[in-house]
Image: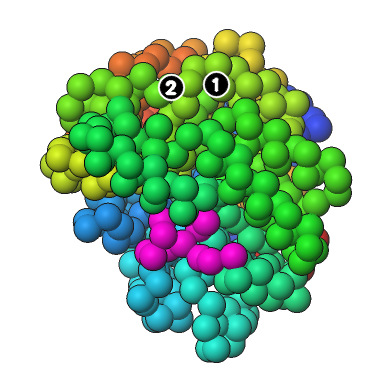
Amino acid sequence: MALLIKNGDIVTVGAREKADIYAEDETITRIGKNLEAPAGTEIVDASGKLIFPGFIDPHVHIYLPFMATFAKDTHETGSIAALIGGTTTYIEMCCPNRNDDALEGYKLWKSKAEGKSACDYAFHMSVTKFERETPGQLREIVADGTTSFKIFLSYKNFFGVTDEEMYQTLTLARQLGVIVTAHCENAELVAQLQAKLLSEGKTGPEWHEPSRPESVEAEGTGRFATFLETTKATGYVVHLSCEPALRAALAAKERGVNLFIESVIPHFLLDKSCAERPGVEGMKHVMSPPLRAEHNLGVLWRALNRGLIDTVGTDHCPFDTEQKLLGKDAFTAIPNGIPGIEDRVNLLYTHGVKRGRLDLERFVDAASTRPAKLFGLYPRKGTIAIGSDADLVIYDPDYRGVISAKTHHVNNDYSGFEGMTIEGRPSVVTVRGKIQVKDGKFIGERGRGRMLKREAAYF
Ligand code: URP
Ligand code: ZN
Ligand code: ZN
């Protein structure tokens, strides 16, 4: 069915206009004043609302076997939560570990999503070892439309790659025109610090941050940048959390390294005191890199507003209270991660745009347009233009609410953002021209989402 959205205030990067949007056959076909539509068209009045391009979360975990357990969401629950929060596309980290076969892993991750997600999705393919068959397997995965890789410099002996493997991955990525995303923490230093702290009887969640201090992340970021410089590959630091790592990344960019930066919503809003809360309350806020000392939050907001930090993701990774308690005797066994897929857009709008830390246009850029451009989805996604997919967020800036696990849709029994206010939320969300969400409720078609196949060689 065709869709006509009338009287909205359309916000894209570089333009703002009051106009109607008409979509047919999944794409936007007309934008203009006082558009007419044929009988049978579904009409939405967007007076008083902002209209944004569907938001893109460039970093989520849905299916994730990790730290002796599995993240809680399925593509069904995760995608519905995403859509309610205004995210119409997510890019999931496909994360087989070092003992798994990469191609088998890729097929497994794809099978978990197929026919289940209510919104569109893509994958970053993790390279967690580099063996003789790896180049062939990665070429096959790229040919299948997954044109970004992920490497972990941390998580020794599980996801983590050696420097040699990083070099091999980046060299291949350069040949294939594939961007490489990287978790940048020095695995050896983390392992040594963890062992030292535990040997001193320091077992609680408050020791997680001291086991992976800012210097450890800055070292990983700088080393990744040096490897990019040498191989001429293009890179993207995921979940950058602190000033020293930012400085390392910006110094590399200044010398011409092709490097982009993502930070994730917990690092803008929560500090390390959350993980210092006693017992399981602290464990709920354990993620890596860890929540940091408070002054870093302002540093990240300022860099984001200036466009030095390119994108805002979530690193959505839900482990429930029972799973977090796996680490009750040792912080090293607390499953790392905080959920956020449902709340990213509303939190960024409220605590960024409404609080004067983030320009409206930069908000759209960081949460939609730049992820689309960096990961080969633009202009199909990430903007409102004729020919683009009709993924639209009709946003109510007058909505007032409070985040709570009691009302969220993520499959988890806690929220890392419990009690935080939101000033705005999506009132209508469409995926390729079909209304999937209305006023906080999923009313659409389950399994509507498609895997987005992307072309390589963007840089
Ligand atoms: O704590 C985190 N970030 N958990 C998910 C795995 C990762 O490092 O992205
Ligand atoms: Zn990570
Ligand atoms: Zn992650």
Secondary structure at badge 2 equals loop
Q: Mark 1 points at which residue?
A: 297
Marks 1 and 2 sit apart, C-alpha to C-alpha, by: 8 Å
Residue 108 in the image: above or below residue 439: below
- Quarter of the image for residue 329 reads top left
Please report contact status of discs 1 and 2: CB closer than 8 Å, yes or no. yes
Q: Can residue 171 be seen in this view?
A: yes
- At horizontal 63% and vertical 15% (from top left) the residue drawn is 357
- In which quadrant is the C terminus drawn? bottom right
Residue 170 coordinates in the image, percent (x, y): 67, 68
- What label does residue 123 carry, if any? none
Q: Mark 2 points at which residue?
A: 271
Magenta extent: 152-163
User: Looking at numbered disc 2 in the image, what kind of residue is underneath it?
Assistant: Asp
Foreground residue, 250 or 118? 250
Residue 161 drawn in magenta: yes
Residue 163 coordinates in the image, percent (x, y): 59, 65
Structural crowding at the residue carrying mark 1, measured as other residues with C-alpha within 10 Å and reported as few (<14), some (14–19) or many (≥20): many
User: Looking at numbered disc 1 in the image, what kind of residue is underneath it?
Assistant: Leu
